[in-house]
Image (cartoon, coloured by chain):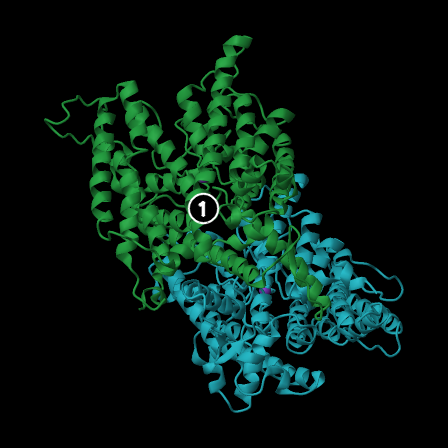
Chain colours: A green, B cyan
Amino acid sequence: MNLRVNWRASVSLVGSVVKWLSVPLLFPLLIAAYYGELEAIRTFVTTIVIALVVGGSLERLEPDPDLGAREGFLMVALTWGAVSIVGGLPYVIAGNQIVLPGQFPFVNIVSGPSTLADPVNALFESMSGFTTTGATVMGDISFETHSRALLMWRQLTQWLGGMGIVVLAVAILPKLSVGGAQLMDAEAPGPGIQKLTPRIAETARALWKAYLGITALEIVLLYGLHLLGPVVGQPLAPNMTLYNAVAHGFTTMATGGFSPEARSIEAFSAVVQWVIIPFMVAAGTNFALFWHVLSGNPRTLIRDAEFRFYIGVMAVLSAILTALLFTHQGLVFIPGGEPVAGNLESSLRHAAFQLVSIVTTTGYASMDFNTWNSSAQYLLLAAMLIGGSAGSTGGAIKIVRWYVILKSLRRELFTTVHPEAVRPLRLGGRAVDEQAVRGIYAFTLLYLVIFLASTLLLFLDAERAGGPNLNTLEALSAVAATLGNVGPGFQLLGPMNSYLPFSDISKLLMVALMWIGRLEILTVLVLLTPAYWRT
Amino acid sequence: MNLRVNWRASVSLVGSVVKWLSVPLLFPLLIAAYYGELEAIRTFVTTIVIALVVGGSLERLEPDPDLGAREGFLMVALTWGAVSIVGGLPYVIAGNQIVLPGQFPFVNIVSGPSTLADPVNALFESMSGFTTTGATVMGDISFETHSRALLMWRQLTQWLGGMGIVVLAVAILPKLSVGGAQLMDAEAPGPGIQKLTPRIAETARALWKAYLGITALEIVLLYGLHLLGPVVGQPLAPNMTLYNAVAHGFTTMATGGFSPEARSIEAFSAVVQWVIIPFMVAAGTNFALFWHVLSGNPRTLIRDAEFRFYIGVMAVLSAILTALLFTHQGLVFIPGGEPVAGNLESSLRHAAFQLVSIVTTTGYASMDFNTWNSSAQYLLLAAMLIGGSAGSTGGAIKIVRWYVILKSLRRELFTTVHPEAVRPLRLGGRAVDEQAVRGIYAFTLLYLVIFLASTLLLFLDAERAGGPNLNTLEALSAVAATLGNVGPGFQLLGPMNSYLPFSDISKLLMVALMWIGRLEILTVLVLLTPAYWRT
Ligand SMILES: [K+]
Ligand SMILES: [K+]
């Protein structure tokens, strides 16, 4: 540990990741070809070439990279940065309609530069994608401004980011002693996560299968509803085309929340909304549990302490929210939709959908919750701190940390009365190491300190830029939604609005928040300490 | 520790405290006599009789009370409850103009029942006084509605509460292992707090002297300015009469914040505002440090780690706030006052005054900060979480806890890079026990959990009651200001407004928040655990 950080090894591996990004970039290229979007073809071919050249060059920095823990931190942090930059190039290229004369003699079909032509906006949108945040600066989301290929790439960035996070959480962070992996291990009865499969590659492969399988199931169900409609003679999911089914399959499993529809899931039928809810719940569940279920131990899921708490919290908060929506006089603002207040099905659906969407940090909206009253909005704001399970694609503080915190606070009360008592903290039958409890306390407080300080910075920059005069709810929700990788906030940055009005400095601050929030904070912050770089 | 809780011993001691409350009740009686407020004389004579009878009766429950730790918790919690109830009687009696015919044949001089005639309002105001919170439900604060005696009693409740808190923090809570007293001990160089004087009574006496001395100094300075004005030929403090000097001396040292002036410290001159600032700073300082200073070791104060951090935080935040006020176009709304924006003295004064007032949890206002822009308001809202020093009358989370948290988070980053390193956390040169660090983490998280949950309850009750439609800033600040014993919040409950519009249930919730916040939370919460009552 006293050697210098071998940054060449880290950068070389980041180069490999960038190079391999060319493979998923083929998907939007195929979409562009299918829809005959000539400009998009040029955009993605250009990006693939850049990814191969840049990634390949970086890869050569170190022929045989071997990572220690410190190189691991650097590699993880740089990977999300580099992938977001390269993955954001299509936004800039398409937005600027860069013409490479002679090589691609196609006619431009887009009329003018989009908001994403601005590199800061493109970086924001791309980081928001790969961190599965889902906050957008597009402003105008439509096929008139953006190609189908580009909007599908935006969806795919989240799916890729989500897979990266699962592998990171289960296979890499535990080796760096970050992210509370000890807990996941302690908690899952049967073989612990790290013992699931002995090697990273195998673990990753097992998780890919679950991730891919559940995504495919959702796509089949959503598109199946679309096809079934004409058969049964009533429209079940009229606009859930194959394109939309794939697009939303990508961003549900990633708890991403991007949608090619400007009005998110409000654009779809009630049946579709009901179908998406359990998939969001699954996306926020510890993926190791699916491994157990698929291995023939379905009871592992039901017995798991974190999973029970996760379901319980969502059930209770959904019930409160249902009551708030049901009694909210005059809550009728879904364009052409049914009233919500006084309608139990509708209240329950929107409450459950929105609560699950926020707790799992998906960020989809089944209606514009900007129109809700302030108590319902506060419930969502507070829920933004909760987060998904450890080992899922969900962000924020994460439900297992809250579970441990609440249990340990109860213990604190007990030991105040009985100072002589020694009570180990139990999670799913096993004692939790006190070191892990301290780590959870520290993470949560670090999260809250960063939260409070970033909100102040956002306010100060808004003041400086003379832009929109933020109110408390807007500023708090902007930080909660980016640091927690949730996506939409309230009012100015509500689910049907965007982060476009913020200044470049504020946007870059939020890019940093999405980045550190996604990587369990410590992974990035250690890079800023002198101790990290000292030889 | 396996015996039953001896509640009789606790209640008997609470009875003694209630009985002795009759002594300070003589002070408003004297005021009433001086101003010839006949109705107030009857009010306070009645209250004194009740205090003597009730207190004396409770005292007899146990002839020779001997307290263990568990009885200590009960006694402390009950004391603030009982004193608030008995100390709130004058509000109800005066508000209802209860006539005792024959006994006190005086004519009523008040025209109708005041808001404090309502027992819930009276309890709120009284608890707000004895917990040194300073949140008010009076609505109309004027000598036309309330007697001078009653308004002085309101000031005195805070001074008494403040003294109780200092004794509690320094002499009682350490024996109950609550309140981070280990830290105070570790931190003060030279003799630790518990070693200052071997016995509670002596410790309490030493602190009384410091508390009384600084209060007297402030009264002399404030009234001195008033008297000096005509001498130097310009009005220095025209309305700082002896009554006002005493009234504000009481509530500054208690970090209380009540004022008999409806517009708080805005009612006084700039000189008065400048004079009050250092006294608020002193009120938020660890009182043990004054003992060292008075013992001839003034350098102890400057060398103290907590004190330096406390001053540093307030200096930095005041500087930011000054910049925000200085550049806030059109900030001119002090009735008949000078503009703030563009005026350095005025910006600096209001920024420093308000920031110090909030961080120390005093709650005075030098102007209506409801008129500030949202970034300045957010800064104050976040500052409501900071709190005064351990061993002071300040509330909230307390600065020493933040100091330890920030230091330990830095250590967490270091040990993430160097997992093998063992680094004790140092505070003023001494290592802090890891148990104490865990206790600080737990307290802070408990505070934040209660904060978030209470805000939801407040919202839900506002919804139920159909009263004012709270916004996020109002609800968050209501909880921050009551749980942290700060006093005023924002907008509806801003410094020139009141908590009057809240429903009875919300008010009782806030009474509970002031109570548990003031008693370091655990002291009250342990009473709710089965473990506490088990034999
Ligand atoms: K999201
Ligand atoms: K106060």
Q: Residue at x 48, y 60 (%)?
A: B367
- Residue at the limit of the structure toward the front, as seen here: A198
Q: Tell me the residue at 26%/34% (across/down).
A: A90
Question: Label 1 belongs to which residue?
Answer: A471
Quadrant hosting residue A4: bottom left
Toward which corner of the image does residue A38 lie, by quadrant? Answer: top left
Horizontally, residue A501 falls left or right of residue B445, namely: left
User: Residue A55 location in percent, x, y?
Assistant: 24, 43
Foreground: A385 or B319?
A385
Q: Residues within 10 Å of mark 1 (few under 14, many from 20)?
A: some
Q: What chain is tagged by disc 1?
A: A
Residue A531, image x, y percentages: 36, 67
Query: Is B195 above or below relative to A477?
Result: below
Between A467 and A152, which is closer to the camera in this rendering? Answer: A152
Query: As displayed, is residue A362 above or below residue B495?
Result: above
Q: Quadrant of the C terminus of chain B?
A: bottom right
Looking at the rendered image, the quarter that the N terminus of chain B falls into is bottom right
Q: Nearer the viewer, residue B23 or A522?
A: A522
Q: Is residue B373 visible?
A: no
Q: Is residue B33 left or right of residue A274?
A: right
User: What residue appears at the point 71 percent right and 55 percent down from the top-left corner?
Assistant: B121
- Residue B432 coordinates in the image, percent (x, y): 54, 75
Find residue A59 and report its horizontal and vertical position in percent: 24, 47
SS for dot 1? loop
Q: Amino acid at mark 1?
A: Asn
- Quarter holding ligand 2: bottom right
